[in-house]
Image (cartoon, coloured by chain):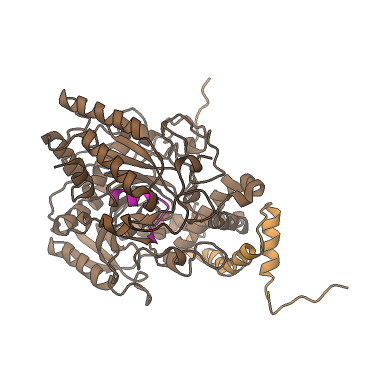
Chain colours: A brown, B orange
């Protein structure tokens, strides 16, 4: 086996970790394969804003040396990773894919999540593309790469963790960090045919991540499989990496960490120049190791359909979703239809919260440098000026009510499943409305991630089929607050019976693609 | 004497309101973008108003949290 076949083939991160320990691959081999894939295809796909080739090579050599002498930092040791460019990495500047973002912000420092990856031996290959500040759209007159979909390069990779998703799909790294304020992990995971986890709010520190909506932002993993996401989550929460072959001990703890820092929300430190130290107010989320076995006997699955199948959704979606639910019931789960409470209200609360909180962060820059922002970014942020203080507070009161209602729903079911989107990856020209803003009456109204951002619950997106045109479709699996273990267990069981997560795009589909929009460079991105 | 308002084009004064709020925040949106924000506001304002119709929220606490620390000496 070669590093290239591990990354671009069907191996998951955890399988690659096992191959590293078997001697079938080396970290240097994996990293060289990742760099070679980037050299060949990044110009078309727009995965990276900045690459750390030489530092990655050095980290890979170190990983191989450590593993050879018996120092095993766990399943991420020696594995190539990408990091969304809204998250600080000491090796290079954070651009947030924006001309406006202050390059001195967190310069030369690792965000806590990055420090934890590094301590676990991960090989950081570079910073990946993101919609500007996590909320813009690709814009041709800005000096940033176009995030193309490896399955169809005329289509969008999704966002805002665009490059993190497309890079996993294209074999440029085995896993990546993303952030999710309204769906920015799950939507690109869905469109690129990979898995992505939105952890419980407060589970993973957000310090060193450029904020969009303080009460909404979460950092989480994208990778091929649910089990991969579990391995990364464990490290992101500050727990020791353990052995190279991750297993479920089934143990719980009260949130202790390997580096002594908090597992809870560190938003307060993420506002620029924060210390990055713990700030959890004494509240810690219980953490349980997932028990991966494939048997779902007795598991109660709530099936949410009410808002997910519009008349203009993809015609293959109903069949794919029914088949996915059948896989779960075939593993012993009991399915029951559920209605998600306060659906429209929660979507409104996310809009109100993100626009208000985002405008608070950006207003001074917007008034001075309006034209430097992307049109779609400033369109969302400007909407915050149309929200009153009372609107904002009322939105937070409704979120309290809705959280209680959803908590009650989870007394009757163990997980809730629903499609991640009603459509596959859209073409670039379908993203914006007449004003150049995100088209919420169109494509963005068919992405069903936002509801969950208003809540604190964990949600996993996994590939579940293909659109009529052959693009990936995705299943969301939501669980009770702090119960990532059950969500990941269900995702893993599903992926033991399906191979959607193992299917990879044919490089020939994008290798010959002629770029339509400008393809930026790291130097331009950092200008 | 003031000019008559074009009630047909903007029956609820949404355009005036949106332009005023943007200006008050110092946001120099151009014509096409403002038109988009006005159109969106026509949908967003009723949705935000509907949040006040959630009866269960009448006596509820908002999702707001202060981190209180004793300052270090």
Tell whether position A160 is magenta: yes
In this view, A480 is above or below A340:
above
In this view, A264 is above or below A382:
above
Nearer-the-camera pick, A32 or A325: A32
Nearer-the-camera pick, A186 or A524: A524
Q: Which residues are magenta?
A: A155-168
Tell whether position A517 is magenta: no
Residue A324 lies, in percent from the top left, at 21, 65
| Residue at 51% from the left image edge and 54% from the top image edge | A353
For residue B21, what is the image quadrant? bottom right
Residue A266 lies, in percent from the top left, at 43, 37
Residue A435 lies, in percent from the top left, at 57, 65
For residue A251, what is the image quadrant? top left
Residue A250 lies, in percent from the top left, at 17, 42
For residue A393, what is the image quadrant? bottom right
Can residue A95 be seen from the camera position used here?
no
């Amino acid at each position: 086996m070669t590093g290239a076949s591990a990354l671009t083939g069907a191996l998951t991160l955890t399988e690659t970790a096992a191959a590293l320990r078997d001697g079938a691959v080396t970290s240097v081999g994996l990293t060289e394969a990742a760099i070679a894939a980037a050299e060949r295809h990044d110009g078309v796909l727009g995965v990276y804003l900045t690459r750390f080739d030489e530092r990655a090579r050095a980290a890979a050599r170190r990983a191989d040396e450590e593993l050879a002498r018996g120092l095993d930092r766990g399943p991420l040791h020696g594995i190539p990773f990408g990091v969304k460019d809204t998250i600080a990495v000491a090796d290079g500047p954070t651009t947030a894919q924006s001309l406006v973002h202050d390059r001195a912000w967190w310069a030369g420092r690792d965000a806590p999540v990055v420090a934890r990856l590094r301590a676990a031996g991960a090989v950081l290959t570079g910073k990946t593309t993101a919609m500007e500040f996590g909320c813009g759209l690709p814009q041709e007159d800005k000096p940033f790469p176009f995030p193309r979909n490896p399955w169809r390069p005329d289509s969008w990779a999704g966002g805002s963790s665009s490059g993190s998703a497309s890079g996993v799909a294209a074999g440029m790294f085995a896993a990546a960090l993303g952030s999710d304020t309204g769906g920015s992990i799950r939507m690109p995971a869905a469109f690129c045919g990979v898995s992505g986890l939105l952890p419980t709010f407060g589970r993973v520190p957000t310090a060193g991540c450029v904020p969009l909506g303080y009460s909404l932002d979460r950092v989480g993993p994208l990778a091929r499989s649910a089990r991969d996401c579990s391995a990364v989550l464990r490290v992101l929460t500050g727990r020791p990496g353990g052995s190279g072959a991750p297993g479920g001990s089934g143990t719980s703890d009260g949130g202790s960490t390997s580096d002594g820092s908090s597992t809870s929300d560190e938003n307060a430190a993420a506002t620029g120049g924060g210390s990055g130290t713990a700030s959890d107010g004494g509240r810690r989320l219980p953490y349980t190791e997932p028990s991966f076995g494939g048997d779902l006997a007795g598991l109660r699955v709530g099936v949410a359909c009410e808002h997910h199948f519009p008349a203009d959704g993809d015609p293959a979606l109903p069949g794919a979703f029914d088949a996915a639910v059948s896989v779960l019931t075939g593993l012993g789960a009991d399915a029951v239809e559920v209605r998600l409470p306060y659906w429209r209200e929660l979507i409104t609360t996310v809009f109100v919260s993100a626009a208000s909180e985002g405008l608070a962060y950006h207003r001074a820059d917007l008034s001075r440098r309006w034209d430097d922002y992307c049109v779609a970014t400033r369109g969302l942020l400007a909407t915050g000026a149309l929200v009153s203080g009372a609107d904002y507070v009322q939105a937070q009161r409704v979120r309290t009510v809705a959280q209680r209602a959803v908590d009650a729903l989870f007394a009757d079911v163990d997980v809730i499943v629903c499609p991640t989107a009603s459509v596959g990856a859209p073409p670039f020209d379908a993203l914006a409305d007449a004003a150049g803003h995100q088209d919420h009456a169109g494509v963005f109204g068919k992405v069903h991630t936002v509801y969950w951002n208003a809540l604190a619950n964990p949600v996993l997106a996994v590939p579940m089929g293909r659109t009529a045109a052959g693009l990936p479709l995705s299943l969301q699996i939501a669980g009770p607050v702090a119960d990532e273990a059950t969500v990941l267990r269900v995702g893993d069981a599903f992926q033991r019976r399906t191979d959607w997560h193992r299917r990879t795009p044919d490089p020939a589909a994008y290798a010959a693609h002629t770029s339509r929009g400008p393809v930026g460079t790291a130097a331009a991105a950092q200008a | 004497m003031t000019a008559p308002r074009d009630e047909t084009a903007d029956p609820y004064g949404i355009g005036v309101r949106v332009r005023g709020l943007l200006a008050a925040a110092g946001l120099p949106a151009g014509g096409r973008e403002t038109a988009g924000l006005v159109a969106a506001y026509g949908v967003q304002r009723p949705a935000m108003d509907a949040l006040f119709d959630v009866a269960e929220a009448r006596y509820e606490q908002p999702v707001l949290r202060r981190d209180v620390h004793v300052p270090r000496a």
